[in-house]
Amino acid sequence: MDSSHGIRFAFGTLTVLPVRVTRWDREAGRAGMLWAPLAGLVVGLCAAAAGGLLVLLGSGPLLAAVASTAVPAVLTRALHLDGLADTADGLGSGKPAEDALRIMKQSDIGPFGVVTVLLVLLAQVAALSELYADGWARGACAAALAAVAARLALTVACRTGVPAARPDGLGAAVAGAVPVRGALGTAALVAAGAAGAAAATGGAPAALHAVLALAAALAVAELLLRRCVRRFGGVTGDVFGALAETAATVALLVSALG
């Protein structure tokens, strides 16, 4: 398959960038999810540029952190945050899978969703603020890494064996579409790229830190994925959004430690 279809699928479904999706089938979905980290890199670089520019212009680290948190939300129409809120409402409802999925499809946001989104955004801003306080480069690199980790979590979540909870929507289009070997290969390439980029700015310790942040992000996202599959019977577009925000947040928190 022409890789351009996969790239279009990744950018067309995971960002608001003006990219026309030319194919919407399982093959395009498979390729798109394998290219998802590239979409994350573009979003992350935009977030890094916004925060780093503000620091260089003399703003405080808190304002830079807010900017780097806002950019990914803008570039995704806040769909990942919406998915996080809906997933939190579904998990917190305590109802059977069918009823929980119905709650997730409703347009309003319940108390579980509101609290979860609030805490996640606060954690992202707090972590980025600390990172930018240590220098614009450290904050910018962490912002880029978090966005890549968020989309890599989607690649892994779309691996063979993970079912869709509904017969329609993005979840059904890509669930189980990515071969396990392909998901692992993409994760290894992303980890190597993250380590190389971090080493260029901070040496071996920074490279190790970046890989640990990426690994922790994927591990926590995997725990959430398994919980959602048990609870809902599979994945949905909302679950993918929750996985992305979870992975990004964990990557930032680990990056801010040490």
Image: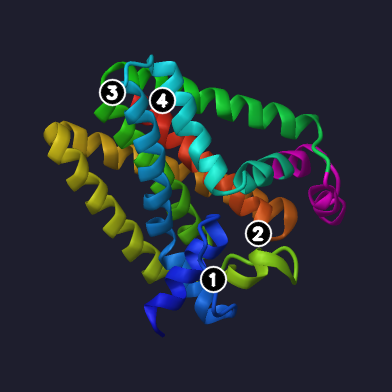
Disc 1 marks which amino acid?
Arg
* Horizontal side, residue 71 vs residue 141: left or right: right
SS category of the residue bearing label 1:
loop
SS category of the residue bearing label 4:
helix
Which one is nearer the viewer's eye here, 79 or 236? 79
Callout 4 crowding tier (Cα within 10 Å): few <14, some 14–19, many ≥20: many
Q: Report which residue position mark 1 lands on.
A: 20
Numbered disc in front, either 4 or 3 = 3
Q: Report which residue position mark 2 lands on.
A: 235
Disc 4 marks which amino acid?
Leu
Magenta range is 87-107
Numbered disc in front, either 2 or 1 = 1
Ranked by sequence position, the earlier of labels 2 and 3 is: 3
Ranked by sequence position, the earlier of labels 4 and 1 is: 1
Residue 94 in magenta?
yes
Ranked by sequence position, the earlier of labels 4 and 2 is: 4
Ranked by sequence position, the earlier of labels 4 and 3 is: 3
Q: Alpha-carbon distance for marks 4 and 1?
A: 33 Å
Q: Position of residue 47 (x, y in %)?
A: 41, 38
Disc 3 marks which amino acid?
Leu
Q: Position of residue 242 (x, y in %)?
A: 61, 45
Q: Residue at x 41, y 24 (%)?
A: 64
Callout 3 crowding tier (Cα within 10 Å): few <14, some 14–19, many ≥20: few
Quarter of the image where the C terminus is located: top left
Q: Report which residue position mark 4 lands on.
A: 128
Q: Position of residue 35 (x, y in %)?
A: 41, 65
